[in-house]
Image: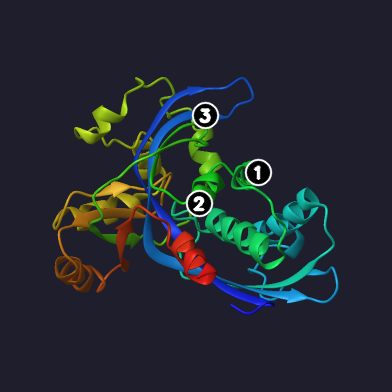
Amino acid sequence: MSGEYLRLPAPAKLNLMLRVVGRRADGYHLLQTVFQFVTLCDFISLHKRDDDAIRLLNPLPGVPEDTDLTVRAACALREAAGIQAGVDIRIEKNIPMGGGLGGGSSDAATVLLGLNRLWQAGVTLETLAYIGLSLGADVPVFIEGRSAWAEGVGENLTPLDLPEPWYVIVSPPCHVSTARIFSSPELTRNNKIIKIANFLAGSQENHCLPVVAALHPEVGEAMKALAAYSSPRLTGTGACVFAPFGSEAEAICCRDHLARHHQVHIAQGCNVSPLHLALQSVGQ
């Protein structure tokens, strides 16, 4: 970092469990889930400008610049802080889009935390999480930066210390619409509420999996392929599926076999976000 520039990671997340336990009057679903970060990351470059323009230097195809979450995050922070400031944003995409790995939400969180530092805006972490929630239900966990048990729409967070295995993540060749999954008449919405102890004892279902697999056979095929090596799960509403391994060598072996027919990543689970570790390093 200089006084004018930052390059920071935006980590992917896995949902180690996802339960749908109700629905609010406004249509949002009530969830229970467990978030864990992984070392698969996008990278966000932030270059402070001399004027107050906010520019995304490499917009994603089909996404207007002013609707991109990174631009919206920068605008929201500037308004909350009551400052005049500008920035050039560049995104290095490594996290598959539409895969349930939280890439867009993570990118937005990295912009909020990074610009709060770069602009010296002085906004509290609590306020950043509140701003993040207005951008997406997954943004607050990336702001808080700890693996967590989550309830509500995903914003009520309880930090968890979890094992940090290596994961193989398979990205099927399809884009799953979260809105379509949650609007499906086939989705069961009144599942039993459980406690953290139930998850730790092995309750790790994803209630979206039957709907996702029915709409996207590629997800079922990826689950079957990964099941030959470990116990696969779906992250979020998909499309990515993942499985834990006891060592990096085992994960690499699985990846090398599956990569002949699938897009595969390996990454290590981490209870502290790589973004927060990077920001701590910057501050030293």
Query: What SS does tag 1 mark?
Result: helix
As drawn, the residue found furthest toward the front would be: 284
In this picture, is 57 found above or below 83?
below
- The amino acid on which the numbered mark 3 sits, given as a three-letter code, is His
- The amino acid on which the numbered mark 1 sits, given as a three-letter code, is Thr
Of the numbered discs in the image, which one, if any, rests on residue 127?
1
Drawn side of residue 48 relative to residue 216, left or right: right
Q: Is residue 83 visible?
A: yes
Comparing labels 2 and 3, the label whose residue is closer to the camera: 2
Q: CA distance from mark 1 to mark 3?
A: 23 Å
Comparing labels 2 and 1, the label whose residue is closer to the camera: 1
Which residue is depicted at the point 48% across and 62% down?
275
Q: Which residue is mark 3?
A: 29
Crowdedness of circle 1 by 10 Å Cα count: few (<14), some, many (20+)? some
Q: Is residue 55 visible?
A: no
Drawn side of residue 80 relative to residue 141, left or right: right
- The amino acid on which the numbered mark 2 sits, given as a three-letter code, is Phe
The answer to whether the residues at label 1 and label 3 have Cβ atoms under 8 Å apart is: no
Crowdedness of circle 2 by 10 Å Cα count: few (<14), some, many (20+)? many
Q: CA distance from mark 2 to mark 3?
A: 20 Å
